[in-house]
Image (cartoon, helix red, strand yellow):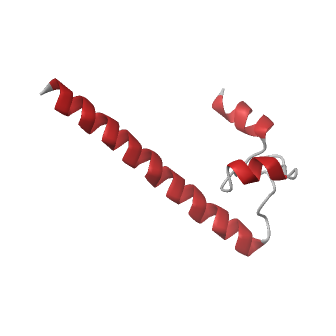
Amino acid sequence: DVREQDTHQRMQAEIDSLNERVINIDAAMQRIDKGTYGYCQRCNKEIPAARLELIPEAAYCVQCESDLKK
């Protein structure tokens, strides 16, 4: 029972994470349509290409993302 619950909780966490990523990807696609993709939604500075290569749906530059998580 405990192992099944643990497995279920891990699977649900993965599903939640994937659902959040889909939402973020949809938002990024909307930013593409608006012409704001690649710019931080907080400070409006350009998000470095290397960051967008790693996280294409990134809405914030590294500094603003860090500030938001505090």
The residue drawn where x is 74% and y is 53% is 53
Number of numbered discs visible in the structure rendering: 0
Residue extending farthest to the right is 45
Q: Is residue 41 visible?
A: no
Can residue 20 be seen from the camera position used here?
Answer: yes
Q: Compare residues 13 and 60 and report the one nearer the observer.
A: 13
**Measured from the top left, where is residue 6 in percent x and y?**
25, 29
Against 2, is 65 above or below? below
Q: Would you identify the image quadrant in which residue 31 lies?
A: bottom right
42 relative position to 56: left or right: right
Q: Is residue 36 above or below residue 21?
A: below
Left or right: 3 with respect to 63? left
The residue drawn where x is 66% and y is 62% is 28
Task: Give x and y (percent) for residue 1.
Answer: 11, 28
Quarter of the picture containing the C terminus is: top right
Residue at x-position 79% and y-position 51%:
40
**Up-down relation of residue 6 to residue 53 (above or below):** above
Quadrant assignment, res 67: top right
Side of 55 where 4 appears, left or right: left
